[in-house]
Image (cartoon, rainbow, N blue to C red):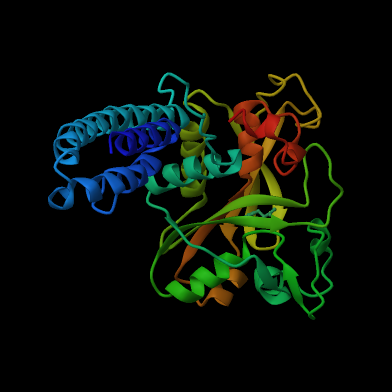
Amino acid sequence: MLDTLNTIDETARTALSAADSVDAIKAWYNAHLGKASELQGILGSMGTLSKEDRPIVGKNGNRIKRELQAAYDARLVELKQAEMVSKLSAEALDVTLPGRPIKRGRLHVSTQILNEIYAIWADMGFQIYRSRDVETDEYNFQLLNFPVGHPARDMQDTFHTTEKDVILRTHTSPGQVHAMREFYPEPIRVILPGMCYRYEQITSRSEVQFHQVEGLAIGTDLTFANLKGTIADFARRMFGKDVRTRFRASHFPFTEPSAEVDVECFICGGKGCTVCKYAGWLEIMGCGMVHPNVLRNGGYDPEIYTGFAFGMGPERIAMLKYGIKDIRYFWGNDMRFLEQF
Ligand code: PHE
């Protein structure tokens, strides 16, 4: 009987040292110490043993059971420890590593300038009025006093769509008529910002697409002095109080009288460069008193109402402010340019 017990003991110990995981050692327990194990079977049938065997089994069987239990307990702790260590090293997190940098986007330089322009006009009481990019010939030209076939149309080379008389707007001025028709008979003080398109040769100072910010004020007592004062004030707020501006008599079919506004060219310091066409001054807007025909087209009686309008180029303003030498950079999508602002 002692031999049987010793064999059970040896077999169990060999199997225990071969068990290399918590799952394996639990299976081992069921096989060697569980209710259905051989050892428990022998210990549970003491009553049927012979007189000589009974004390041998009682003494050795219980000793073997205790020792195997102790070996199992020790091995279980060991295996659990080992599993924890390997899990920890597999899931290791090095909290001292630097984080991944987050790429920050930014607003396009034109958007930044537009926001500045909006803020200045908002301070002066002008609301933003949005108007569409795709226009009809009627709004873009006819209602602004450019009749069909009139030579003044040559000033604005136009993109035509495949639909008859539907074009990309060449300026934001058509918005004037949309605003007047919407607000009549109220007085108006709005700016109309947006993208404009011209089928032009691309040079350092002209692009096929560019922003404009149109302005329109309609009232019963507005004069050219109001126009001049308002624009000079805008220039001071935009470029600083010492900036020099000049008004040059000009012509637009939809304003009378008309003027162009120049700011001294900061790019060359007034010495002359390709951007200012060697004039030392850069034109930033056209302006004038709203032509009676345009007032009438908007529904306002020119005998009662007067108004002034202006249209400025935000990219030109950004060029002056930041010393940008070529307008083509704006839509060239070169990160080296865009990241500077
Ligand atoms: N629309 C004109 C242009 O694009 C600018 C302008 C606007 C002139 C309003 C006078 C009044 O050249």
Q: Position of residue 218 (x, y in %)?
A: 46, 62
Between residues 223 and 153, which one lies in front from this camera angle? 153
Q: Is residue 35 above or below residue 8?
A: below
Residue 300 visible in rendering: no
Between residues 163 and 65, which one lies in front from this camera angle? 65
Please give the name of the residue rendered at 78% of the width and 80% of the height, measured from the top-left corner.
163
Image side of residue 44 versus residue 260, left or right = left
Please give the name of the residue rendered at 50% of the width and 69% of the height, measured from the top-left corner.
179
Ligand 1: image quarter: bottom right
Q: Quadrant of residue 73?
A: top left
Q: Is residue 45 above or below residue 73?
A: below
Image side of residue 123 versus residue 42, left or right = right
Q: Quadrant of residue 18?
A: top left
Q: Position of residue 173 (x, y in %)?
A: 62, 62
Q: Quadrant of residue 290?
A: bottom right
Please give the name of the residue rendered at 71% of the width and 69% of the height, measured from the top-left corner.
141
Q: Residue extending furthest bottom? A: 164
Q: On the rendered image, what quadrant is the N terminus found in?
A: top left
Q: Position of residue 267 (x, y in %)?
A: 69, 24
Residue 127 visible in rendering: yes
Q: Position of residue 213 (x, y in %)?
A: 57, 51
Between residues 160 and 257, which one lies in front from this camera angle? 160
Q: On the rendered image, what quadrant is the C terminus found in?
A: top right
Q: Residue extending furthest front? A: 51
Image side of residue 282 versus residue 105, left or right = right
Q: Is residue 175 above or below residue 247?
A: below
